[in-house]
Amino acid sequence: MSPTPAASSGQILIDAAVGGDAIACAEEQFKAAGYATHRDAKNSLMVQGDRETPTEGTGYEVNVARAYLGPVDGNSKLLQWGVQAETRQFKTRGSLVGYEIRTPTRGEVLLLTRQVTETCAKA
């Protein structure tokens, strides 16, 4: 998986022929970190991992990590690598609606997405 750094934007570009391997690698890394993983049904080049974070009180937090590949304008042989990390805060158990994004995002999920990029988006 030879990444090609885009000159000025800091993007990581991956050969489309190995895009599926990069996403499978990210999925393995999420699982190894104890995250439940989910593949996007509409986009096979995106995987999400989530893990509940212990908190005090009745609320709870969920760390969410995503890795994905997207198209590059004008070049069908390259895909752009991306990751996202967020921590969602829920006020009560049993309700998946009404969460807020925690600011700042927990460091552990940020570290995970950085490690996934270093491991999966390089040769």
Image: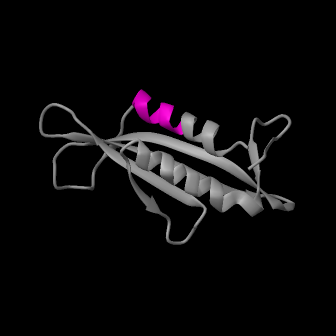
Q: Indicate left or right for 31 with 20 as reference.
A: left
- 19 or 40, which lies in front? 19
Magenta stretch, main secondary structure, is helix
Residue 57 horizontal/vertical position (percent): 12, 34
- In the rendered structure, which segment of residues is drawn in magenta? 104-113
* Location of residue 4 by image quarter: top right
> What is the quadrant of the C terminus in the image?
top right
Q: Report the residue at 53% width, 43% height from top.
A: 84
Q: In the picture shown, does residue 99 fall above or below 95?
A: above
* Location of residue 121 by image quarter: top right
Whether residue 70 is visible here, answered yes or no, is: yes
Residue 106 horizontal/vertical position (percent): 39, 30
Q: Report the residue at 83% width, 34% height from top.
A: 8
Residue 65 horizontal/vertical position (percent): 46, 45
- 98 or 122, which lies in front? 122
Residue, far bottom = 42
- 123 or 79, which lies in front? 123
Q: In the picture shown, does residue 107 fall above or below 76?
A: above
Q: Colour scheme in the image?
A: one colour
Q: Report the residue at 54% width, 72% height from top.
A: 42
Residue 86 horizontal/vertical position (percent): 43, 40
* Location of residue 96 by image quarter: bottom left
Whether residue 104 is visible here, answered yes or no, is: no
Q: Indicate left or right for 45 with 87 as reference.
A: right
Q: In the picture shown, does residue 10 fall above or below 26?
A: above
Q: Indicate left or right for 75 with 17 as reference.
A: right
